């Protein structure tokens, strides 16, 4: 009588394979969440960058334009809104664009007192309405909570041009 070996896998081998698969899924899930958050941040920054360019162009066509910011706090999302005309005009015109800012993003300004960016008819920043930092610019700093990734949109005071700088 001959004994033939039984072919198959043992319970221990099955547990090891399942453990390795779970570890790989966990690592993939964390990476997916971070990539998804970065894509969301990139989308918000791109909309804001386009909005600033639109405000500058609108200002040149309508004798001024401004963007107001309502920053996220608590459970409310924030937003930015574009208005043609002058901020100090008593008869403010209707908004043309409004976009959300998710509360998961940290948004701050340099100088910190800024929440309105006014462009004049030449397309540069109106320093009577929008305070400038020591460099003569206005900066919007955007980051993800707890992440090292930082995006700075610098609006050059003299020209109104928007320069984006991403730090990982």
Image (cartoon, grey):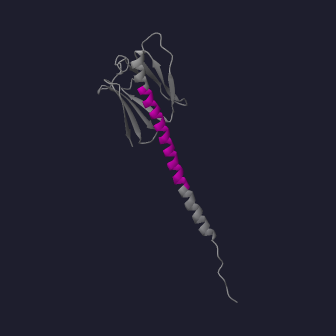
Is residue 28 shown in magenta? yes
The residue shown at (50%, 24%) is 97
Give coordinates of residue 145: x percent, y percent. 46, 38
Residue 115 seen from this side? no
Quadrant holding the N terminus: bottom right
Give coordinates of residue 81: x percent, y percent. 48, 23
The residue shown at (63%, 69%) is 11
Most distant residue in the front direction: 61
Secondary structure that dominates the magenta span: helix
Quadrant holding the C terminus: top left
Most distant residue in the left direction: 135
The residue shown at (35%, 25%) is 160
Q: Examine the rendered structure and indicate whether residue 143 appears above or below residue 27.
A: above
Q: Nearer the viewer, residue 160 or 105?
A: 160
Q: Examine the rendered structure and indicate whether residue 45 appears above or below residue 158.
A: below
- Write down the region rendered in magenta: 25-53
Task: Classify residue 48 as left or right of residue 125.
Answer: right
The answer to which quarter of the image holds residue 161 is top left
Give coordinates of residue 54: x percent, y percent. 43, 25
The answer to which quarter of the image holds residue 130 is top left
Q: Examine the rendered structure and indicate whether residue 28 appears above or below residue 12.
A: above
Is residue 153 shown in magenta? no
Task: Classify residue 24 as left or right of residue 58.
Answer: right
Give coordinates of residue 132: x percent, y percent. 33, 23
Residue 50 seen from this side? yes
The answer to which quarter of the image holds residue 166 is top left
Counting every numbered tag in the picture gives 0
């Amino acid at each position: 009588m001959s004994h033939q070996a039984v072919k198959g896998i043992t319970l221990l081998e099955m547990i090891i394979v399942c453990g390795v698969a779970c570890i790989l899924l966990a690592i993939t899930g964390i990476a997916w969440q971070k990539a998804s958050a970065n894509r969301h941040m990139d989308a918000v920054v791109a909309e804001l960058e386009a909005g600033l360019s639109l405000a500058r162009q609108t200002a040149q066509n309508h004798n001024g334009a401004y963007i107001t910011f309502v920053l996220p706090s608590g459970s409310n999302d924030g937003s930015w809104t574009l208005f043609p005309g002058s901020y100090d005009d008593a008869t403010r015109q209707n908004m043309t664009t409004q976009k959300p800012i998710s509360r998961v993003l940290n948004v701050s300004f340099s100088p910190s007192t800024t929440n309105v960016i006014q462009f004049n008819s030449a397309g540069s920043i109106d320093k009577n309405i929008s305070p400038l930092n020591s460099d003569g610019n206005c900066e919007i700093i955007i980051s993800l909570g707890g992440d090292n990734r930082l995006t700075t949109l610098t609006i050059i005071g003299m020209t109104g041009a928007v320069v984006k700088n991403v730090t990982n």
